[in-house]
Image (cartoon, grey):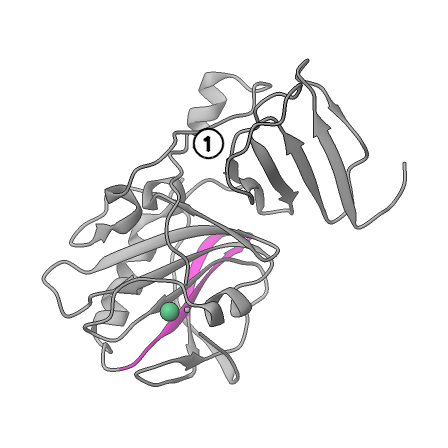
Amino acid sequence: MINNIVGYRILHSSGQYSGDSGIGYDYILARNGVYICASNKLISARIPISSYCHIRGLADEKPYIQLAHGKIPAVLFELALNTALNGKDKEMYMAVTCLEDGYHLYLTSQKGTGRDVTYERMPDTVCDIHSHIGKIGPFFSGQDDIDEQGLKFSVVLGYLDERFPVCRVRCGVYGYYFNILWSDLFVGDLHNCIDANATESSDDIILPEDISQEEKEEKNVELHIKHGLRQGHSGGGWWHRFMSHRRVM
Ligand SMILES: [Zn+2]
């Protein structure tokens, strides 16, 4: 076994992979394109990073995401949305982290303007959440791509001036991004907010054949991941604990 940071693997028509895994992440060459695959103690993800193509002789790969401690309770999203709505004259950044006692939402001591927000990162962040000012829609900018590195999810909140704000959720794997549904990341109901990715066409996905249906449901790995736009922002300052909530699942 070679301890390379990056692994390169091929998914053969037999369903078997060849090639060595890296200790950081793997690129997977499949019939339907190239994927990147990585995991840490909180998140496992495999997302497509190329447009569709047909590579003869290989098997199709599928997107996959899984949170080690289950999906994030919707109440944390609601707290983040309400916080953003209360300060919609400037951009805001919040982080969902996963600690031993569950998921927590943090609001930083930060500098936000109508165009960007600077913030500091939290350890064990599972999801970055940032908002746009009132009339701006939910898109990820090139700056968001720079800020939101690593293996984690991100949410952008837009159209906060509207009766129903709109959110967009994506999975990031070391500089690559893949839009997913709100319900792929959060458990509970989405109230008073529209999921932008749910309104666009998509491919259903998913997963590990080595676990039972029961386990899939338990671990919430039934995903409906969707492709979408990417575009976003930035950081400095220090963190203050804003709110915490025990995990409810
Ligand atoms: Zn943004």
Q: Is residue 211 left or right of residue 243?
A: right
Name the outermost residue toward the left: 163
106 or 35, which lies in front? 35
Give the magenta-colored segment's residue range. Answer: 90-106
For mark 1, give the secondary structure: loop
Residue 244 picture location, percent across and down: 40, 62
Where's ligand 1: which quadrant? Answer: bottom left
Residue 227 picture location, percent across and down: 39, 44
Mark 1 CB near ligand 1 (8 Å cut): no
x 45%, y 19%: residue: 214
State the residue position of label 1.
221
x 38%, y 57%: residue: 245
x 51%, y 26%: residue: 207
Residue 85 picture location, percent across and down: 21, 71
115 or 129, which lies in front? 115
Magenta segment: does it hold 96? yes
x 9%, y 62%: residue: 163
Which quarter of the picture shows residue 243? bottom left
